[in-house]
Image (cartoon, helix red, strand yellow):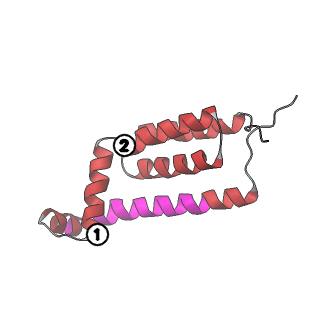
Amino acid sequence: MKKTPFRLTPYQVQWLLVVGFVTVGYAIYIRYLAIEFSGTALACDAGLQSLLCKARALATTLFRNSVFGITAVVIATLHLIRPSIVLLTLGLIAAGLGIVLYNVVLSGLAIGLLILGFARPAPATA
């Protein structure tokens, strides 16, 4: 019995493109307009209570503890064991955030594991 490798349909590829661009775009927005932009950083450090400052504080806390990279590696490992579009989407989100928000090593490893998931056979369907 021949097992077919995990393949994506065109709609799934389009979904992953949209999710990837939105995720990386938001991460770039947070990094360059909230974390590294001195005007926003000074205002947030002075006590401004805006949604951007709360997103900045959350992103800073998460990337200092390597949450993006660790989450991406865990999800990518699960995707390598049992490939699915849900795990691929979640792994892409975590890795995209991690690459832009300073968790490059672990997120790069996760991207490699996500790519290796395409060499695995697809789960059996009923």
The residue nearer to you, when weighing 49 against 124, is: 124
Residue 67's tag is 2
Residue 38 lies in the magenta stretch: yes
Residue at which label 1 appears: 51
The residue shown at (35%, 62%) is 30
Instruction: Return the x and y of residue 81 as percentages of the image width and height.
Output: 62, 32
Q: Residue furthest right?
A: 1
Residue 58 seen anywhere in this rendered image of the structure: yes
Q: In which quarter of the image is the N terminus?
A: top right
> Which one is earlier in the sequence, the residue at label 1 or at label 2?
1
Q: What stretch is highlighted in magenta?
A: 17-39
Magenta stretch, main secondary structure, is: helix
The residue shown at (48%, 47%) is 95
Q: Is residue 31 above or below residue 66?
A: below
Q: Which amino acid does label 2 sit on?
A: Val
The residue nearer to you, when weighing 68 against 105, is: 68
Q: Which amino acid does label 1 sit on?
A: Leu
Instruction: Return the x and y of residue 73 as percentages of the image width and height.
Output: 48, 37
Q: Using the rendered view, name the quadrant where residue 121 is placed.
A: top right
Q: What element carries label 1?
A: helix
The residue shown at (47%, 58%) is 24
- Relative to 45, 123 lies left or right: right
Residue 36 seen anywhere in this rendered image of the structure: no
Q: What element carries label 2?
A: helix
- Relative to 48, 75 lies left or right: right
Instruction: Return the x and y of residue 46 as percentages of the image width and height.
Output: 11, 66
